[in-house]
């Protein structure tokens, strides 16, 4: 089944404790992206990647890192999480033609992160 | 900068009645417009898009949207609502040139009563 998976689905952590949220897609998509969803703000893009070893900042990159060493994986790293990073996070992927023109992305199920 | 406004936090409609979820946008250049739906505990699912051409766009599950350039709107519509349509709906926009990232609206919760 074609899908985007994220792990963990739920995470409660404390301020300053490094964490990684994994994202993996099995559709051989070049384009991958991370969003955070907050009430009243919709989805905001954190980082995106057009291909392996190619990443770029989205609208709200502060406090996050990403890497793209393989096409299928795009982990989101919080080096020193803070309470304002408590949010619902979504990973998405797309083949480049769709991403560049149509932006028809495939979303993962989401990771709910709470930073105490 | 591009932006999207969804003026209603929630829309309530009775099953069988027509529904409209409103969206207005602001973008430099020509817009690419999208609607996504989010069911509880799920990621977003693509519903439909407007890129160019006919102003009335048809999408999944019987939904359609009308692009109105003069009013900078892209309202989502369905002639007859189903209880199963109850979900959170997001409008999104990007310009036809430049940065590829979508800008999403804040979302509208659609509640269809039996």
Image (cartoon, helix red, strand yellow):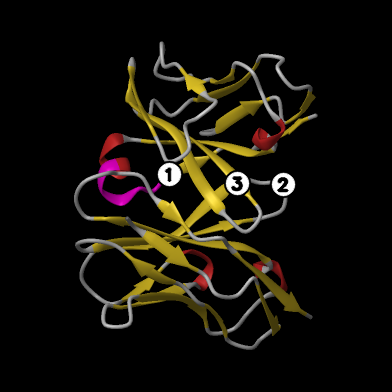
Residue B104, given in percent of the width and then of the height, sits at 47, 55
Q: Please state, as top left, top right, bottom left or bottom right, where the C terminus of chain A lies in the image.
A: top right
Closer to the eye: label 1 or 3: 3
Q: Please state, as top left, top right, bottom left or bottom right, where the N terminus of chain A lies in the image.
A: top right
The answer to whether residue B97 is magenta is: no
| Part of the protein shown in magenta | A100-104
Q: Which residue is mark 3?
A: A37
Residue A67, given in percent of the width and then of the height, sits at 44, 16
Neighbourhood count class around disc 3 (C-alpha, 10 Å): few under 14, some 14–19, many 20 upward: some
Distance from Cα at disc 2 to Cα at disc 1 = 18 Å
Chain ID, mark 3: A
Instruction: State the mark number for residue A105.
Output: 1
Instruction: State the mark number for residue B41.
Output: 2
Closer to the eye: label 2 or 3: 3
Chain ID, mark 1: A
Distance from Cα at disc 1 to Cα at disc 3 = 16 Å
Of B59 and A70, the residue lying toward us: A70
């Amino acid at each position: 089944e074609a899908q985007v998976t994220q792990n963990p689905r739920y995470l409660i952590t404390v301020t300053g404790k490094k964490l990684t949220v994994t994202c993996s897609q099995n559709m051989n998509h070049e384009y991958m992206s991370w969003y955070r969803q907050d009430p009243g703000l919709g989805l905001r893009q954190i980082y995106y990647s057009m291909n392996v070893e190619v990443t770029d900042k989205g609208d709200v990159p502060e406090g996050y890192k990403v890497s793209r060493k393989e096409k299928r994986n795009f982990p989101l790293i919080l080096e020193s999480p803070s309470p304002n990073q408590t949010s619902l996070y979504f990973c998405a992927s797309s083949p480049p033609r769709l991403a560049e023109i149509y932006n028809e992305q495939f979303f993962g199920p989401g990771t709910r992160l709470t930073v105490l | 900068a591009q932006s999207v406004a969804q003026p209603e936090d929630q829309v309530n409609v009775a099953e069988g009645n027509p529904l409209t979820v409103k969206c207005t946008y602001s973008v430099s250049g020509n817009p690419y417009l999208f609607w996504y739906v989010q069911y509880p505990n799920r990621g977003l699912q693509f519903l439909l898009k407007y890129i160019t051409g006919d102003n009335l766009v048809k999408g999944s599950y019987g939904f359609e949207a009308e692009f109105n350039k003069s009013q900078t709107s892209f309202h989502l519509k369905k002639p007859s609502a189903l209880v199963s349509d109850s979900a959170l709906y997001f409008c999104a926009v990007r310009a036809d040139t430049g940065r590829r990232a979508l800008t999403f609206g804040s979302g509208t919760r659609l509640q269809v009563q039996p």
